Structures are given as structure tokens and as C-alpha cells.
Amino acid sequence: MEQVGIITSEARPCPWGAPAKPINQCSLTEVMSEELARELQLEEESHAFPGEALTDEGPFLTSENLDTSSDAVLAQMLQMQFDKEYDAQLLREEKKFNGDSKVSISFENFRKVNPCEDSDSSGDEVDWQDTRHDPYKADKPTTTPKRGFIGKGKDITTKHDEVVCGRKNTARMENFVPEFQVGDGIGMDLKLSNQVFNALKQHSISEQRKSARLHDKKEVSTTEKVVDPKTRLLLYKMVNAGVLETINGCVSTGKESVVFHASGGSMEDQEVPDECAIKVFKTTLNEFKNRDKYIKDDYRFKERFSKLNPRKIIRMWAEKEKHNLKRMQKAGIPCPEVVMLKKHILVMSFIGKDQVPAPTLKEAKLGLEDSKAAYSQVLELMKQLYHQCNLVHADLSEYNMMWHDGKVWLIDVSQSVEPTHPHGLEFLYRDCRNVSQFFQKCGVPETPNERELFNIVSDLNITSDNQVDFLAEIEALEKINEAHVQNHSKKVATFQRDDDGPPRLYDE
């Protein structure tokens, strides 16, 4: 009988599929073997990164060619590997986010490893564009960018470069005003910093404004020996009208006016002298700022003084001198004769001869006899001015009295006020002091002091022995006069002003 073959489990197929391979048993010696550990590592790498070559330079670094005895080296290796894995994940996220969009974004700024570090180019290769070792450019120092900029474009020259900006600032100096001298530095390789250029620009602007202010001041005001266009036009009209033949030039200047000499012409209603003096009042108050106290309290101009511009005040000043001269001329006081008044230009007769003005008492250098005669004339003129003209000169001195033909002539009476002025007696005391001091210096023995001269002129008979008490009594008198004028003005019905004499007050 034939023996039936025995079917073993190995020959019989398993209905549930192929059986699992038996696990190879290994000893403890094999487990401790380094070769076995390496095989296990390679196997794990193949499962973790399928499709990648299992080489020594695979995803994980090996320690065959490196010294792994140092923990720092191992840490660097692990960090590098982590960075590479992070960059790979970032790249996948970037592709997933962009998709098929035409506009894409990049996560390059978030990468851990610079792409240039992954370049396969050898370190021995030299880029043909690298000029760091060029002997022809070795003498040029490399400029270190400010503020630590080391990103892309660090070698690009912008408008903020020191050299470019400095040369541009130098070229922009040509745009300064012509009055501002910049020298010959523009033709040189000059580099100006922004701070220096801004300082020069501000200085140029300030100088231009200053020059413009001075130019405007000369154009709109009358200064020493210079007339503005409006004044010049008025003078031309006088010449064209035949009032004046010619204007010869400036003969004197003062704090408030400029005087010109002119040859007289003719007028229908009055005779014009052969030689005339044209007094042009300065249209600025910078030279004589205290004019208002002489005119604002004068009842003849008080109502017209308020709310006026300086040019109109100067016209009023010239008008005031015209009326004062007419009062003096009517009383027989030697003074210039008024020809005409046009705004701030007053035409008068010329005191002098052949275009040479008569000297003032300060310039005359009189002898003792002439000084005595001059003092007696001045004393009489002050009395006439106070009592007949009802005026106080208010600026009487050796500079405002001229010596001509053996007589004393009074000039510059634009500031003259009436004794009832709130400061009229103070002005009179000042005039007496100036006259007394001058003639005492000239050696006139009969010259009294200022207090005695004040009593002689005003007939007030103030008996104070010292100056302080004398001035106190003068102030008391001024207050009494002011109160009297205010009470009397309430009864006034009409003011009648006569150009040929002082204003007269009429009651109802």
C-alpha cells in the first residue's frame, strides 16, 4: 500500500493570505553591534522618507566624517536639520496657499536657511562679477552703509548718499538771491551737508527780507536827503504850475524835516519870493516819535487827531506850522513867510542869500555886543510870542534861532502850543532854561536864570527859590488852567478860526 504523502503546513496554502515572515531572533551581542544599529537607522529612514536615496548625506546627518564627541557640534547639526525640515514645510504651505493664482506670495522672509547656502557651486569657483579682489579697485574704500543696513540693495547709491546729497546741495546754492554772495565754491567739488545748507538757506531768506524792508521803507517814506515818489510828484507839480522855477538841492536836515532851496516863480493871488525854502516833513515817526503830545491836546486839531494814520498826522503837523507862522507874521515877529502848503510840503521864504542859509545862533559865533543885542531881541520875541500870538515855542534853543541881517529869526514852530495846553507852561520853562543857559555861556552878564526868565515872560510871579518847588507850582497852575478850559468849553457855541491870526472864542 502506497504511503500517502503528508501535507505539511508549509506546503498547504493559507486561506487567509500569506503568512507573516518569521521574526529573526538575535542575540544580545548583535543588539549591541553598531552595524545593526546602522541598518535599523537606514530602515527607519526609508520608511520616513520614501523615494529618497539612503546616502550618508541624506535627511539625517551622520557622524562618520564629523567629530561627534562635542555636544555643541551635535546641537548645530540638529538645528540645521530642523531648519531644513521647517523650510521644506514652509515651501509646501506656500505652494498650497498660492495654487494656480497669477498673483502669488512668498514666504522667503520666514525661511530659516538662506537659499544661497544651499548652492551647489564650489567654494573654489570665483564669480566673474566679484570685484573685491580687483587690484584696480582696491584703492577705493568701501562705504559702510549707515544704520546697519545689510539687506538686498545695500550697495545701491540713493539720493540720501552723503556725496550725492552734498554735491546736490552745493548746486542748489545757485538758486539763492543775487544779493547773497556764495563765493566761488560752486565751481569746486564742494559737498555741503543738509545742516549747513539749511542754515545758509535760512540766512539767505532773512537777508532778502531785510533788504526788502529797507527798500520798501525808502520807497514809502521821506528820509534824510531823500524823497519818496509821492513827494517827488508834488514837487514836480509845483514846478510845472510855475510856483517854483527850479529846485536846487538840500540845505539842511533835521529830526522832523528836510529843507530844500528853490528859486521862486509866480502865483496869481500872492507874490513868491526869489528864494524859497521847501520844508518836507518826514513821513515816518521813527525820528521824532513824541509829536502826538504837541498836537493831540491842541483844541485846533484835537477833533481831527484821533484814528489817523501817520501820513495824515504829518500833514496836520505841517498845517500846524503854517498857522503858527501866520500868527507870528501878523504880530511882526521875524519868521519865514508862508507861500503855500501842499499836504506835507510847506513852501516858505528863504532866510539867507544866494542859496546859503543864514547861520543859527549856535553857528554864528557872535561877539559880546552882538550877543547882548541877540539876547534882548530873544527876550522881546518870547514876550510877543506869549502875549500877542498866544503861543509857546516849545522847542526854543540856539538851534532854532537864526542870525540874519543883524536880527534874530524864529523857525521850526510846528510843535508850538498855546499856554492853555496841559503842558504849555512846562514847555515855556524848558525854553527859558535853554535860552538862559546859552546866553550865560556867551558871557551876557544881564542874563537871568530860567526861573527869573520864566516870570519875566509869563508875568506869573512864582516865588519858589528851588527848581523842584518851582516846577510843582507850574504843574498846579496847569491843572487850574485845564479845569478852567474844560468849564469854559461847555459854554462854547462856535469856534471861529482865522488863518491870519489866532483862533477866537465866541460865547452865545
Image (tube, helix red, strand yellow):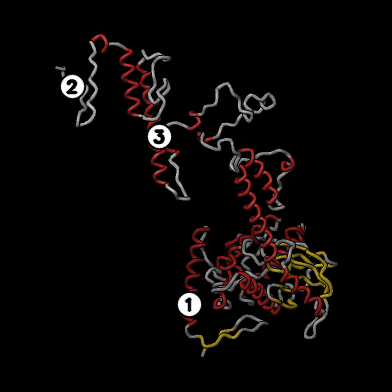
The picture places residue 301, in percent across and down from the top left corner, at: 58, 77
Q: Which residue is mark 1?
A: 484
Question: Callout 3: 10 Å neighbours few (<14), some, many (20+)?
Answer: few
For label 3, the SS is helix
Q: Nearer the viewer, mark 1 or mark 2?
A: 2
Residue bearing the label numbered 3: 88
Query: In screen coordinates, is 47 left or right of 11?
Result: right
Name the element at disc 2: loop
- Residue 399 visible to the viewer: yes
Amino acid beneath label 2:
Ile
Q: Is residue 149 above or below residue 11?
A: below
Identity, as a three-letter code, of the amino acid under mark 1: His
Q: Quadrant of the N terminus?
A: top left
Instruction: Give the percent coordinates (x, y) of residue 397.
Output: 67, 62
Residue appearing at x 66%, y 28% in the figure: 140
Q: Amino acid at mark 3?
A: Ala
Left-right relation of 83 to 174:
left
Q: Is residue 162 left or right of residue 410?
A: left
Separation of marks 1 and 2 at Cα, in angstroms: 162 Å
Indicate the quadrant where residue 256 lies: bottom right
Give the labeled residue for mark 2.
Answer: 7
- What is the distance, in whole Å, between disc 3 and disc 2 at their CAs? 56 Å
Work out whether residue 196 or residue 52 is closer to the camera in this orientation and state it: 52
Residue that lies at the very extreme toward the left in this rendered image: 1
Residue beneath the point at 55% across and 87% down: 494
Q: Is residue 141 visible?
A: no
Residue 458 position in % (x across, y down):
58, 70
**Circle 3 or circle 2, nearest the eye:** 2
For discs 1 and 3, the disc positioned in front in the rendered view: 3
Say if mark 1 contacts mark 3, CB within 8 Å.
no
**389 or 166: nearer the viewer:** 166
